Amino acid sequence: MKDLKEDIPRLISNDEQLHYYHWIVDTCEENDVQIKGQDAMSIATFAINLALLDECAKSIAENGMMLSMRGDRGTHNIGKVNPSVALQKEAQTALRFYFSQFQMSPS
């Protein structure tokens, strides 16, 4: 597991993603889940989706689920779903897959 924590894939681009990357490796180690160097990219993608989920939750908390936007002709405001809602749904779908692959699901 030491190699996984030292040779971090370049996909990891910020501190939040790095935090989740280390958390996943540590959690797998603590629970005797067998991971290898070849799992680094999957772990990185898992971490990126966890960070994305956090980012979406912050956006929804700050801006709401609906955004007020100017209409095409600029005459009135219209309500539009915050794009973070769709991104959050996609990240959650990916996370369910990764949780199960790394034996982290409740089942």
Image (cartoon, helix red, strand yellow):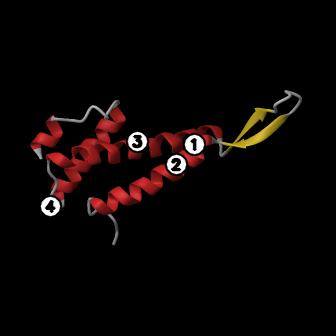
Crowd class of label 3 (few under 14; some 14 to 19; many from 20; radius 10 Å): many
Q: Give how far apart the Cα atoms at labels 2 and 1 are.
A: 6 Å
Q: Give how far apart the Cα atoms at labels 1 and 4 are.
A: 35 Å
Residue located 42% across and 54% down the image: 94
Q: Give how far apart the Cα atoms at labels 2 and 4 are.
A: 30 Å
Mark toward the start of the polypeptide (3 vs 4): 4
Label 2 element class: helix
Q: Is residue 78 left or right of residue 28?
A: right
Q: Are marks 2 and 1 in contact (CB under 8 Å)?
A: yes
Q: Is residue 91 left or right of residue 101?
A: right
Label 3 element class: helix
| Residue projecting furthest to the bottom | 107
Residue located 81% across and 31% down the image: 72
| Residue projecting furthest to the right | 75
Residue 26 spot, x, y in % from top left: 20, 49
Residue 31 spot, x, y in % from top left: 18, 61
Q: Which residue is mark 1?
A: 84
Mark toward the start of the polypeptide (1 vs 4): 4
Q: Which residue is mark 4?
A: 32
Q: Give how far apart the Cα atoms at labels 3 and 2 are.
A: 10 Å
Q: Is residue 32 above or below residue 52?
A: below
